[in-house]
Image: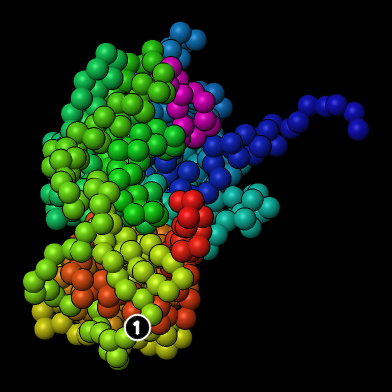
Amino acid sequence: MPIRRLEEAVIRKIAAGEVVDRPASVAKELVENALDARAGQIAVEFAGGGIDLLRVDDNGVGMALDEMRISIERHTTSKLTTEEDLRHIRTLGFRGEALAAICAVGRVTLMSRPAGGEEGHEIRVEGGLITGARPAARPVGTTVEVRDLFWNVPARRQFLDSPPAEARRLLSTLRRIVLAQPEVGFTVRSAGRSLLDVPPARDPSVRIGHVYGEAFASQLVPVEMDEPGLRLRAWFGPPELARPTRVDQHLFLSGRAIRPGALALGVAQAYARYLPRGQHAAFFLYLEVDPELVDVNVHPRKEEVRFRSERAVMDLLRRAALRSLSGRGMLEQSGTGPSSGVVVPARTGPAVPLLAPPVGPAGQPWRVVGQAQASYIVVEGADGLEIVDQHAAHERVLFERTDTESTVPAQEFLVPVQIEVPFDRAEALRRALPALRRLGIHLEAFGERAFLLRGWPAPLAERQSRLGFQEPIGAVAERLLEGEPPLVELWREVACAAAIRAGEPLPVAEQEALIRDWKATEEPARCPHGRPVAVRLEWTDLAHRLGR
């Protein structure tokens, strides 16, 4: 086949794929354009997961008609003019591709009125070409309405997920932007229902409270650090706010939400001693960097950046995380805390029972020696020693206490418990309310992102009531954001939240009860997530190692 030039319509569609792959990316580009237009208030509305309709309205500086016509062409921008400007990028968008890409694969209506202009205008675009233009009454600012995304690229449209799944991605994207831009007010609506309505915030911590709830935000530990070319304002979650995924690990670079990537390793190193395997710290990092020290032009959707010295940034984040832990007194824990290496028989005296009381005869083929690091239970048996991860063992016990094939009985509360979650998770929870009820979680929507918890799975209710319900509901919501997991997956998260934690001292009686219940499970070797529960050391192997 001879080499030839592609038609312009084909070029537009190919180029669009680098920037626009689903409704979430469309929303990101349009909202970032509004932010660069110095908008103080942005409204987003969508239907059909953003496939059928996505509208972004702002009160920014607006555009005149001739600028509107130019804006839909490729490589047109107001963000930079010379090659030198690429070294000093201070805007969110600068490639000049986003609006042209969106117009190439959607039916677009663009309305705008510039500051000082007497009237606004509207243009309609299909396949990248203007099909109509007329005057339009509107206040200063811009509205971009995108309908029927990928209407002319059916091969790409068929790879989109269901509308609910696309809505989850879209809302997660908006959550990151809302957190990154606390000084801007946002509203989000879907199918005529308000999902978010937050005013401008004076401080990132206030915006975190807007999104996650005041109860969550009040537990975060603030840290500020200034170094040459770097300024960090950070809020770290204490270990008890750890999450089963990294969904609540946020890094914002000069107002841009980016993937923490390898930089999160510094924070993970600081938290390593205080979190069980599979748990991840929550953090919100607002980083200001000299533009000379960072290249934001390495990813088509600007989700990744390259620092001149990534090691220096990683070390800064590690030291900030250590400072947050030190501020809570965690780095000075003594003998029986997580940093201790001794085996202790734990505290004595009366204790609240965490497990079923011992049953059956007291002559048994094993004996609990004690706890190590308040996290592991050392068990002596006829053939050797077992070192048992108490959290993993309790997870296995709780996981097997119910059958998710049938409805789990619930313990109803006399007074409901109010739970707040971010707005994207709230939408996922609303859709899953019937499934959660089958697990014994009786949850009722109560506003934009609040719920009333009226009942909890009976086998876990007593202990979970002492621990609180915010964490397990948050963990379930995170799992729902990843798709529509089966009930057994959700039950794993519920059991994990209720299980004894690493670093939790246990009376001897509770250690023995835990080991007895664990040994009676059907699959004692691994926790519900597949991790090993215990390490075994045979007496003969021990004798061999010691030269006996």
Relative side of 335 to 192, left or right: left
Q: x, y (%) of residue 356?
A: 25, 83
Relative depth, front residue between 238 and 416 = 238
Which three-letter amino acid code belongs to the residue tagged 1?
Gln
Relative side of 170 to 102, left or right: left
- Label 1 residue SS: loop
Question: Mark 1 highlights which residue?
Answer: 364
Relative depth, front residue between 195 and 497 = 497
**Principal secondary structure, stretch drawn in magenta:** loop
Colouring mode (rainbow / by chain / secondary structure / one colour) = rainbow
Is 18 included in the stretch rendered in magenta? no
Q: Which residue lies furthest to the front in this view?
A: 548
The residue sitting at 21% across, 75% down in the picture is 509
Task: Judge the density around disc 1: few (<14), some (14-19), many (≥20) Cα neighbours within 10 Å.
Answer: few
Tell me: residue 68, above or below residue 418: above
The residue sitting at 38% across, 88% down in the picture is 407
Q: x, y (%) of residue 159?
A: 62, 55
Q: Is residue 262 visible?
A: yes
Residues in magenta, as a range: 295-308
Q: x, y (%) of residue 244?
A: 37, 57
Is 302 included in the stretch rendered in magenta? yes
Q: How many marks?
A: 1
Tell me: residue 441, above or below residue 173: below
Q: x, y (%) of residue 53?
A: 45, 54
Rendered image quadrant of residue 226: top left
Q: Is residue 448 visible?
A: no
Relative side of 245 to 211, left or right: right
Tell me: residue 116, above or below residue 223: above
The residue sitting at 42% across, 51% down in the picture is 170
